Image (spheres, rainbow, N blue to C red):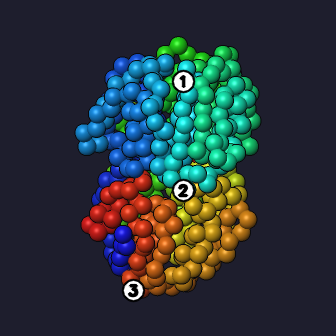
């Protein structure tokens, strides 16, 4: 599908955005291996989270979906059944990496695969620590890549100093640690999102963090809980940037999760002089939730790097769009992880935004954006990457002429209502 985007001014709106992708994946996955019924409200029914549900159903878990309400009939830590066919994770890195931690400890064997993008993304980052725990996991066709074969076995706790700040790696090891003999200790070079630690503990796990070391004790069972999924700050980010870069605009985004491991985008946009207010802060299921208010702003360039990167890794494509509208040279560094996302987001953002007139230089670990260039509409190849498509759409709101986004339906991965909300603005 090709989506046409035209310029919009004076955006004044109050919007609701769909549930958090990371929390939605975890709610059904952890619910499946907990004892009892887990009721989830505000679940993100994007393709990635539906892939997780599909995999769990193939292992005998009954899951009922009613709009954004989901009911998981959990079967306990050892209740999964051997799937009759290969598990298919679609485009979802979170599904394949997290579920591999669970599957490594089962009493059955299975195979997992996904779409073309998934089969190119590195799996050694989970194969290495899981193998240290005793797991039998390997690439079937290519070493270190999906399709993967996992032969379930007994695991032991390890000490693992992860070379990457990745919540998917950390969560995979934590899930395996629930089944392992002995404690597991994990460190990471910078703190990644901690939804797994919060939610697993909520379900009865024993995970604590001491001086930056995450320590997990095996447990006998997890127990079902009700979960209210907050709106996804990664989805809110597109409308935050839209409000900041369009003249005379004011947007309120309701019910957004602001777990501190995820709020790098708010910090970065504030450093860039963005007028953003946090309204009505509250907590739900151990996660902080708020309404976010943004006003049109005269953005200024900034240097973004170091520990903030894992806290805004998924928002860098749209941060690059904000930087085009900022005065001066924005440098994004320490973000080499962008190369192994759904697409190589450094190369792709440079290529596609340049077509619209942006001045972007690709570097080894990020990009340099010289702000202040006027944008014009262009034909944008989304590379089937949801966040590339949505970032280009936001740039299109502030461009002369029409922007045409190819394979625009890829937004369904994380934000199926994106174009509807955009049109209603
Ligand atoms: C996620 C972790 C991040 C993020 C992804 C979701 C998660 O990936 O980019 O969209 O839910 O754990 P990495 O673990 O590769 O950093």
Q: Is residue 237 above or below residue 97?
A: below
- Provide the secondary structure element on which disc 2 rests: loop
Q: Residue at x 26, y 66 (%)?
A: 424
Label 3 crowd bin: few (<14), some (14–19), many (20+), radius 10 Å: some
Q: Is residue 255 left or right of residue 356?
A: left
Neighbourhood count class around disc 2 (C-alpha, 10 Å): few under 14, some 14–19, many 20 upward? few
Check contact, mark 2 vs mark 1: CB within 8 A. Answer: no
- The answer for how far apart the CA atoms under marks 2 and 1 are is 26 Å
Q: Quadrant of residue 373?
A: bottom right
Does residue 295 appear to the left or right of 156 in the view shown? left
Regarding mark 3 in the picture, which secondary structure is present there? loop
Q: Tell whether 354 sits left or right of 127.
A: left
The residues bearing labels 1 and 3 have C-alpha atoms spaced at a distance of 56 Å
Separation of residues labelled 2 and 3 (CA atoms): 33 Å
List the residue tagged with mark 1: 108
Q: Position of residue 348 (x, y in %)?
A: 58, 69
In this view, 238 is above or below 310:
below
Q: For mark 2, what is the residue? A: 116
Residue 194 location in percent, x, y? Answer: 56, 37
Asked if residue 132 is positioned above or below residue 397 in the image, the reply reads above
Upstream in sequence: badge 1 or badge 3: 1
Residue where numbered disc 3 is placed = 401
Which residue does the image show at 46% across and 80% down from the upper left? 379
Residue 88 seen anywhere in this rendered image of the structure: yes
Residue 27 found in image quarter: top left
Residue at 41% across, 79% down = 403
Say which of 46 and 211 sits in front: 46
Residue 308 in view here: no
């Amino acid at each position: 599908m090709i989506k046409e985007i035209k310029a919009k001014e004076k955006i004044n709106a109050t919007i609701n955005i769909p549930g958090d992708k990371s929390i939605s994946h975890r709610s059904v996955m952890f619910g499946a291996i907990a004892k009892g019924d887990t009721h989830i409200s505000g679940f993100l029914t994007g393709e990635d989270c539906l892939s997780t549900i599909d995999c769990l159903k193939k292992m005998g878990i009954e899951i009922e979906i009613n709009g954004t309400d989901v009911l998981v009939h959990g079967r306990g830590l050892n209740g999964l059944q051997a799937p009759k066919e290969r598990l298919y994770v679609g485009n979802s890195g979170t599904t394949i990496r997290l579920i591999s931690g669970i599957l490594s400890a089962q009493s059955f064997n299975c195979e997992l695969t996904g779409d073309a993008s998934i089969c190119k993304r590195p799996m050694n980052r989970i194969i290495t620590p899981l193998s240290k725990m005793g797991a039998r996991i390997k690439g079937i066709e290519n070493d270190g890549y999906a399709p993967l074969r996992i032969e379930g076995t007994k695991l032991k706790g390890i000490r693992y100093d992860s070379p990457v700040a990745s919540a998917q790696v950390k969560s995979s090891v934590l899930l395996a640690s629930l089944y392992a003999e002995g404690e597991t200790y994990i460190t990471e070079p910078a703190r990644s999102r901690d939804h797994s630690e919060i939610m697993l503990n909520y379900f009865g796990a024993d995970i604590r963090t001491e001086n930056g070391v995450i320590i997990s004790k095996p447990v006998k069972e997890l127990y079902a809980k009700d979960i209210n999924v907050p709106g996804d700050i990664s989805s809110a980010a597109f409308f935050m940037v839209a409000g900041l870069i369009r003249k005379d605009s004011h947007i309120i985004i309701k019910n957004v999760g602001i777990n501190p491991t995820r709020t790098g985008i708010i910090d970065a946009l504030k450093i860039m002089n963005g007028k953003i207010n946090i309204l009505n802060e509250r907590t739900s299921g151990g996660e902080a939730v708020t309404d976010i208010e943004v006003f049109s702003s005269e953005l200024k360039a900034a240097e973004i790097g170091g520990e903030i990167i894992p806290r805004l890794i998924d928002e860098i494509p749209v941060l690059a769009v904000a930087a085009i509208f900022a005065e001066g040279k924005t440098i994004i560094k320490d973000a080499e992880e962008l190369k192994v996302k759904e697409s190589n987001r450094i190369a792709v953002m440079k290529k596609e935004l340049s077509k619209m007139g942006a001045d972007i230089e690709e570097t080894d670990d990020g990009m340099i954006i010289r702000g202040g260039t006027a944008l014009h509409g262009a034909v944008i190849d989304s590379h089937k990457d949801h966040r590339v498509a949505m970032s280009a759409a936001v740039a299109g709101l502030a461009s002369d002429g029409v922007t045409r986004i190819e394979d625009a339906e890829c937004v369904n991965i994380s934000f199926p209502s994106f174009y509807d909300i955009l049109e209603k603005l």
